[in-house]
Amino acid sequence: MATKTTTRNTAPDPELKKRAGRIYRKLAKTYPEAKCALNHRNPYELIVATILSAQCTDERVNMTTPALFKKYPTPAKLAAAKQPDVEKIVKSCGFYRNKAKSIRGAAQGIVNDHNGEVPDTMEALLKLPGVARKTANVVLGNAFDINEGVVVDTHVKRLSNRMGLTTNTTPDKIEQDLMPLVPQKNWTMLSHLLIWHGRRTCPARKPDCENCPVADDCPRVGV
């Protein structure tokens, strides 16, 4: 079972923390509409969509989930679903056999252990099949407004290194580096802002540094 990530005891460099604060404020001003890109109406839909989003675009997931949730509108319905039926619906998301197994397993855990309600603690979420820390952070932050940690996806990983906010390359260590840099209440939004910035201004291959709102605070590592 995955373990809970905690903030390091050592305080971050004061200048780095100040620069991170400026970056956060500039991004928040630039992308006031930043939010979770996965369409969902409740915690159940979000946890399923997040599991499906592994190594798949949010756009593809959003094209897939309407049919999935129409047929299986509750955890109980999905928990009772047959594996081949679920596979058929989620096939376009890639790794569909494992993903179908994971979302069915998560639904079964929600039904059997939590009376059909998605749990709102990191410990309980991590016990569900198919749920790792990233998925748990997404659900806690966006479905329950609980800032337990920072979601580290490919965009957050790339930009946090490019901006010099971390030198680590593994999600857990990057998360530990980012958490002390901004107030806990901003952890969920930090991920949204970095993701939106990565998609709109700072893509991997051709970052638009000339029009970047945080160019003055970015060392452009690797650019």
Image (cartoon, rainbow, N blue to C red):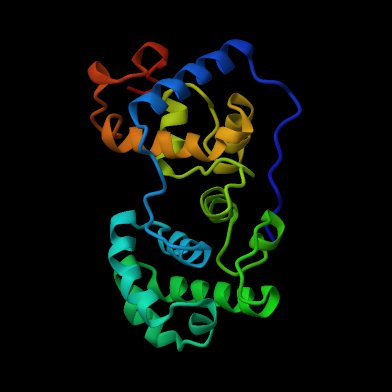
Query: Quadrant location of residue 106?
Result: bottom right
Residue at the image point whose x is 45% and y is 89% from the top? 82
* Coordinates of residue 151 in the picture (x, y in percent): 52, 44
| Residue 57 seen in the current view | no
**With respect to residue 73, does 158 lie above or below?**
above
The residue lying at 38 percent from left, 86 percent from top is 85
Where is residue 75? Give x, y as percent.
53, 77
Q: Position of residue 211 (x, y in %)?
A: 24, 19
Q: Is residue 130 left or right of residue 195?
A: right
Q: Is residue 37 above or below residue 64?
A: above
Q: How many marks?
A: 0
What is the quadrant of residue 119 in the picture? bottom right
Q: Is residue 18 above or below residue 127?
A: above
Q: Nearer the viewer, residue 157 or 15?
A: 15
- Residue 41 shows in this picture: yes
Q: Which residue is found at the position 32% from the left and 70% from the top?
A: 66
Q: Position of residue 31 (x, y in %)?
A: 35, 31
Q: Identify the residue shown where x is 40% and y is 21%.
A: 26
Q: Nearer the viewer, residue 5 or 95?
A: 5
Say which quadrant the C terminus sits in.
top left
Residue 128 quadrant: bottom right
Assign the N terminus to one quadrant of the image: bottom right
Identify whether 71 is placed above or below 99.
Answer: below
Q: Judge left or right: residue 190 versus residue 3.
A: left
